[in-house]
Amino acid sequence: MSMRAAFLSTALALEPWVEEMRRHMPELELVAGGDDESLEIALAWQPHQGALARLPNLRLVHALGAGVEELLADPGLGAHVKVVRLVDPAMTAAMGEYVQLQVLRLHRQDLTYRAQQAAHEWRELPQPSAAERRVGILGLGALGSEAALRLSVLGFDVAGWSRSERRHRGFACHHGSDGLAALLARSDILVCLLPLTPETENILDARLFAALPAGAALVNCGRGAHLVESDLIAALDGGHLSAAVLDVVRAEPLPPDHPFWTHPRIVLTPHAAAATDPRTAAPIVADALRRFAGGEAVRNLVDRARGY
Ligand SMILES: NC(=O)c1ccc[n+]([C@@H]2O[C@H](COP(=O)([O-])OP(=O)(O)OC[C@H]3O[C@@H](n4cnc5c(N)ncnc54)[C@H](OP(=O)(O)O)[C@@H]3O)[C@@H](O)[C@H]2O)c1
């Protein structure tokens, strides 16, 4: 049975999606911009302003990325519309690699060695073992749990934090506000892989930094709005935090005069930790659309009240 869906994105090119969806779902026609009131399904990532509102018959939006905060904030998204987020094992693996790289960089004191090289300074630093390095992961979803597992395989002393109680083999799990205090107190390196919700916005602030051990480091690959940027600069300059790796920032691209560009204890990457790849995402989207059309349960539905 043929199916039509709107393709709504200011950020993603249509052609690769048309090609990959054709491969995995030949019965689907993608309608760019979606200017057809009868459409019931949309694939969306940073849609044009007002695009969702022009689809009064919309029943399902499949996000073409993991975070859905922008879609949920779109005033054109009807309250009854189901939203599916993208959970792609290739994206999970890419994020796992990124977190491994950055935690190893911090663990092996790479920022200090780079600074020493720039100063022509040959000086070996005392090096704790991975088992002596406590890593905390905020968010134990698709991405956070895989990152935690990979770090525990590398030998780090890993623990994670989620909203509800979780159990994972290989690392300790904390939850709720009491659990957060316990996690922070034992995190030499803190990795944020939370979704952006009203509850998690600005969570990486002065109060949270003060609850970390002296000399702790931060890796933020959630969203820029998790972080209070001025609080990070103050914690780094005051010496309580030793370093930060940021894949996401509040204003992307980062403005040219932003202090993060030149801060000696900040490593920046341009929201590159785990990008959507239509080659691996298309079969996942196709599966969700088929399930939806067949009246079956669709996986990875967003809980709209919870915000993720
Ligand atoms: N930088 C990048 O390139 C990039 C790429 C992809 C995604 N991301 C970001 O990564 C985020 C996470 O993705 P995901 O697929 O892992 O999400 P997910 O599967 O929905 O997992 C979210 C996790 O966060 C926890 N959480 C949510 N709200 C919380 C709260 N108030 N207190 C404590 N824990 C809370 C959840 O707890 P429960 O387990 O109890 O539900 C869950 O463990 C995305 O939303 C996106 O912002 C970034």
Image (spheres, helix red, strand yellow):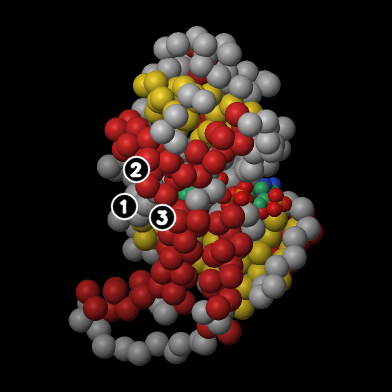
SS assignment at label 1: helix
User: Residue 79: horizontal and vertical position, in percent?
Assistant: 67, 21
Callout 1 environment at 10 Å: few (<14), some (14 to 19), or many (20+)? few
For disc 3, the marked residue is 273
Report the side of 25 relative to 118 (left or right): right
Q: Which mark is residue 7?
A: none
Q: Which residue lies at the image location 63% right of the left edge and 54% below the top edge?
A: 141
- For the residues bearing labels 2 and 3, Cβ distance under 8 angstroms: no
User: Residue 22: horizontal and vertical position, in percent?
Assistant: 37, 35
Q: CA distance from mark 1 to mark 3?
A: 18 Å
Callout 2 environment at 10 Å: few (<14), some (14 to 19), or many (20+)? some
Task: Classify residue 305 by image quadrant.
Answer: top right
First in sequence, mark 2 or 1: give its number.
2
Q: Which residue lies at the image location 53% right of the left edge and 71% below the top edge?
A: 150
Front tag of 2 and 3: 3
SS assignment at label 3: loop
Task: Classify residue 117 by image quadrant.
Answer: bottom left
Which one is in front, 108 or 211?
A: 108
Q: CA distance from mark 2 to mark 3?
A: 16 Å
Front tag of 2 and 1: 2
For disc 2, the marked residue is 254
Q: Which residue lies at the image location 58% right of the left edge and 13% below the top edge?
A: 57
Identity of the amino acid at label 3? Ala
Identity of the amino acid at label 1? Trp
Identity of the amino acid at label 2? Leu
The CB of the residue at mark 2 lies under 8 Å from ligand 1: no
Callout 3 environment at 10 Å: few (<14), some (14 to 19), or many (20+)? some
For disc 1, the marked residue is 261
- For the residues bearing labels 2 and 1, Cβ distance under 8 angstroms: yes
Task: Answer whether residue 33 is visible to the viewer in this image.
Answer: yes
The CB of the residue at mark 3 lies under 8 Å from ligand 1: yes
User: Residue 54: horizontal and vertical position, in percent?
Assistant: 49, 11
